[in-house]
Image: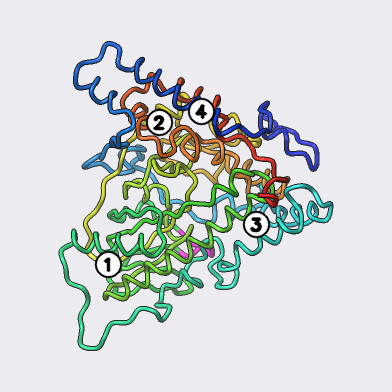
Amino acid sequence: MALKEFKSGDLRGVENKRNVKEVNSSRRDFIKGAGFVGLAALASMGLGPAERQAIDRVGEAVRSFSTLKGVTAADIFRVREDFKRFDYRKTSFARSATDKNSIAYFAVAKYTLVFEERVKKDEVGFRLEDYALYNASRAVSLSTGAGLGNRDSGLYSWSTLGAAKIPSGLNKLDRKPEELSKIVKRAAKTLGASLVGICKLDERWVYANDDKGRPFVFEDVQDPYTTDTKVVIPKSFQSVVVLAVKMNFDLVRFAPYGTSFAGSFGGYDDMAIVAARVAEFIRGVGYKVIPCGNDTALSIPLAIDAGLGQYGRICRLVTPEYGPNVRLMKVLTDMPLAYDSPIAFGLPDFCNSCKKCVNACPAEALPWGDAAWEGPTESEIKGVYKWQQFSDRCLKWWGEVGTGCAICIRVCPWTAGIMKDNDTAKYLVENFPALNSILKSLDDAAGNGVLRDPATFWKE
């Protein structure tokens, strides 16, 4: 299937037949309010007293997800017995730098060059001030060497950054796992995490190899270390603190213009900062850690195990609070912690009805159909039954337009649309999936996810 074509310097086509416009806020609020009155009436027809009472709680804070005790991400996805851990070198980003057979070859380097060319042409959304904002947003990652998640580098260092200190004569914090978990979560939120959950490390989600081809292995040692031939994770590192930081939607709403790129890279800066802080906190109470960005282990299944969200058709984690508009990182540790459970809030059924992200994707990189055991290229994980992305197409398009896109995140109803901060809608999604198409229609009618004119950013 050929990629959709766009004229150079013209991004209007990315809206897939939708007009670029602003939606009056009063109209949006009216549609949303009127829609839920109608939904409440529709949903209550033919229901028992208990169900009617639940629907009558419009406006109250109802629980927006269920906890799945005794299951893991591997159970939810279904993993083949012959599943092999994924090689980091096969990720689309890694292959874009090494595999000339990849359609995304050189795309990462190219999108910076394309961005600069558009700046020289003084295109709206790609002007010098947009370029400066993008570069400033990644100042921490660049200056510390953390990058997009460089293993054991900069703020992701496997050694202390010097902030973690224990007064002489004191031992490590010795509390019950449940109490330690509460302390870690409170600290993580205080130190900048938007979401935090804890899970047991499932070794299947650790990469098979690092970016240099060295295998990740588990050994009976106290400290993690790296040699020329291997990367060693102590077997005692059984707990994973999974963290999420929300990205700035005031920038993402301009995706895919250059203005929005500061939202994506600002997220990477926040990842490194929060991971470093949480790692230093755990070190400071006497335990050992491995802070990770996009390295060392797959973030999404660990985030699912930690109860942060569900996997969506967007091929990313979708959280009840912020949708897919988050960046994930994790801290592996030997601290004995109590584990959270996966959650469910009706997302798979909603995604099957919605498909806004699929329709909006200019690269046609997201799946229309069912889950599959493997994707279209070696950049997708095999042996896990899930929705598979054509990630090489996605990255290739980045190189063509000069940004990191994020259109799919912008249009998702869970990001800033009809599901955002709306417990009634979330309750209906989880308990009345037959109404999902109506919710999606209301989201469309309210104008949620529509591209903002990038010319307005610097005028606001």
Q: Check disc 1 and give the amino acid type.
A: Asp
SS category of the residue bearing label 1: loop
Q: Whole-Å distance between the Cαs marked 1 and 2?
A: 34 Å
Task: Calculate the distance from the C-alpha at mark 2 to the C-alpha at mark 3.
Answer: 34 Å
Question: Which label sits in the foreground, 4 or 3?
Answer: 4
Expressed as whole percent of the image width and height from the top left, the position of residue 309 reads 37, 43
**Distance from label 4 to label 1 (Cα)?**
44 Å
Where residue 27 appears, as percent x and y from the top left, is 55, 28
Q: What residue type is labelled 3?
A: Ala
Do the numbered discs 4 and 3 sit on residues whose CB atoms are within 8 Å?
Answer: no
Residue 62 falls within the magenta-colored stretch:
no
Above or below: residue 407 compared with residue 94: above
Extent of the magenta region: 209-214
Residue picked out by circle 4: 443
Residue identifier under label 3: 97
> Dot 1 corresponds to which residue?
334
| Percent of width and height locating residue 70 | 21, 42
Outermost residue toward the bottom in this view = 168
In the picture, the quarter occupied by the N terminus is top right
- Residue type marked 2: Pro
Return the residue at label 2.
348
Nearer the observer: mark 2 or 3; the answer is 2
**SS at mark 2 in the image:** helix
Q: As drawn, which residue projects farthest toward the right?
A: 121
